[in-house]
Amino acid sequence: MSATLRTVFYHQHFFLKAKIANFGGWDMPIHYGSQIAEHLHTRSSCSVFDVSHMAIVDLAGSRQKAFLQQTLANNIDKLSRDGQALYSCMLNHEGGIIDDLIVYRMGDNYRLVINAANALTDLEWLHELANSFNDLQIIPRRADLSNAHNPLVILAVQGPHSSIQLAKLFPELNNALNQLKPFHSMVCACAFGEIMFSRTGYTGEDGFELFLNQGQAAALWDGLLQAGVLPAGLGARDTLRIEAGYNLYGQDMSLTTKPIDCGLSWTVDLQVNRSFVGAQALRCSNQQRALLGLVLLDKGVLRAHQEVITNQGNGTITSGTFSPSLQKSIAFASLPKDTPLKSIVYVKVRDQLLQAQVVKNTFVRLGKSLL
């Protein structure tokens, strides 16, 4: 059995008495005392998350754009300016989702950020597709990956006060950070070395993801905490992303899931002249399922793998939790595509059938309930 991996922030988590657990092969902080408190603090103020288990992959070479046009379901032409970011799925030839990722345009080059547990599979797939692109270079930037170059780490600073808190550490960047649009990034030299600031996140709140050399990582973490930013673990990150309606690979989608069946058809550009891996399979397939939201009407907690009974047929919960923001149990469920919103369904919880209402699977954004 292989040993679990640790990010460069492990000793900071240990010092803060975090509850550590295995997440995708990594020893990661689940919480620092109270997952619910960390969740609510992120919604109302600002928290920092260690997400350095995510894998950064840089591209180099003259045919990067053509490679990404073939590899990604979304259209890389949408990145018309330096610093823009694009969310996309990467599909197999059958149209199943290998991974979801964010791609950044960085001048003439591109950067991918892929899921932690999928890194090896993704890299193998990228190398396979790259065989027909002569001078293309695929450069991992996570320390444990083969041929990694100048490893980087990622800290996510999330919450409505994120720009205010970052301005305490980076006063010279105050205006630039405030003006940075969502899904845009900028690279700046500062006291912690060169940092890429990206206005992205996984919480449904305003926030930034900071990419920097691992040699400066501990100093930045300590600086953020000294500025009043509180640490939050992956437990809060999960409940925040469920409230916000963000899918998690391996739960809400997989190799057997097509984007149209898990609410991600908006990430696919099927223009007539586009030919990417999986495009033909998508053009020949029809929607079978829908990823919808559930709000529990009875007492209990919705969890993944619970069966859902509807008038249109049965389904399965893919992600479920108790929502600290709404004080209700909520879930994503893969249901028959014609399941109507606002309909009442039944969830099998142990030996009981509990009532739930079908809703859109976005529950909270920017601190406000969408129910």
Image: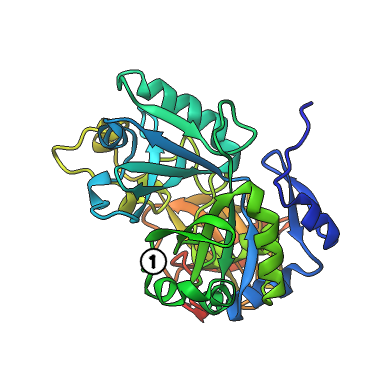
Pick the residue in front: 285 or 226: 226
Q: Is residue 290 above or below residue 365?
A: above
- Residue 98 visible (yes or no): no
| Residue 84 located left or right of residue 305 | left
Q: Position of residue 276 (x, y in %)?
A: 27, 33
Q: Residue shown at 47%/67% (left/top)?
A: 362
Crowding near pointer 1: few (<14 within 10 Å), some, many (20+)? some
Q: Position of residue 338 (x, y in %)?
A: 36, 56
| Residue 112 located left or right of residue 286 | right
Q: Is residue 101 above or below residue 339?
A: above
Q: Residue shown at 71%/47% (left/top)?
A: 8
Q: Which residue is mark 1?
A: 182
Q: Residue shown at 51%/56% (left/top)?
A: 195
Pick the residue in front: 7 or 4: 7
Secondary structure type for disc 1: loop
Q: Residue shown at 41%/21% (left/top)?
A: 128
Q: Residue furthest left?
A: 273
Q: How many marks?
A: 1
Q: Is residue 83 above or below residue 119?
A: below
Q: Position of residue 226 (x, y in %)?
A: 71, 73
Q: Position of residue 214 (x, y in %)?
A: 63, 47
- Residue 58 visible (yes or no): yes
| Residue 240 located left or right of residue 270 | right
- Quadrant location of the N terminus? top right
Q: Could you say which quadrant of the image residue 53 lies in?
A: top right
